[in-house]
Amino acid sequence: MENFTPYSALSGGVLIGAAVALLLLLNGRIAGISGIVGGVLPPWRDAVGWRLSFLTGLIVAPLLYKLLGGQLNVQIHASLPLLVVAGLLVGYGTSLGRGCTSGHGVCGLARLSARSAVATVTFMLSAAITLYIARHVLNLGI
């Protein structure tokens, strides 16, 4: 949080909102990342092409930003086994909640979905409790 600026947060939010709105308006699809990723994994769903394009953009955009001189200061202090376990738990939670933070928290809340509001509150409470336990009970150094 030491590098937080309201302008970068605002511009990032505007870009995310624009991307979500454009995907919905032009393609009729919700920008839920777990659903998009799930659609490119076997068994394949319909329209794999736009999903691969979207995911490619998620990977290429920060690389292009860095290539053009932008700063990417990402630091991960967790061990690889902890990251693997965390990823598996997130995947399980996404399946259990029938969506992820982008699908429910960004798209669902924008559509005033009550189901998405409950899911988002559940995500946020679970994250806060998990972080508290990891930092203050288990002292994992995250």
Image (cartoon, helix red, strand yellow):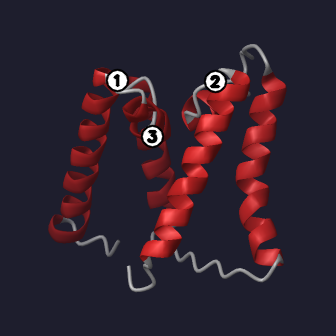
Classify 10 Å Cα crowding around label 2: few (below 14), some (14-19), many (20 and above): few
Please provide percent x and percent y for residue 122: 25, 37
Please provide percent x and percent y for residue 63: 77, 67
Classify 10 Å Cα crowding around label 1: few (below 14), some (14-19), many (20 and above): some
Instruction: Say what secondary structure mark 3 lies in.
Output: helix
Please provide percent x and percent y for residue 72: 64, 77
Q: Which mark is residue 113?
A: 1
Residue 91 in view here: yes
Nearest the eye: 76 or 61 = 61
Instruction: Say what secondary structure mark 2 lies in.
Output: loop
**Mark closest to the chain's N terminus, 3 or 1:** 3
Q: Residue furthest left?
A: 137
**Mark closest to the chain's N terminus, 2 or 3:** 2
Q: Is residue 114 above or below residue 33?
A: above
Q: Amino acid at mark 1?
A: Ser
* Residue at which label 2 appears: 29
* Residue at which label 3 appears: 106
Side of 21 relative to 85 (left or right): right
Q: Is residue 129 above or below residue 107?
A: below
Give the CA distance from mark 3 to mark 1: 11 Å
Which residue: 72% across, 24% down?
Answer: 27
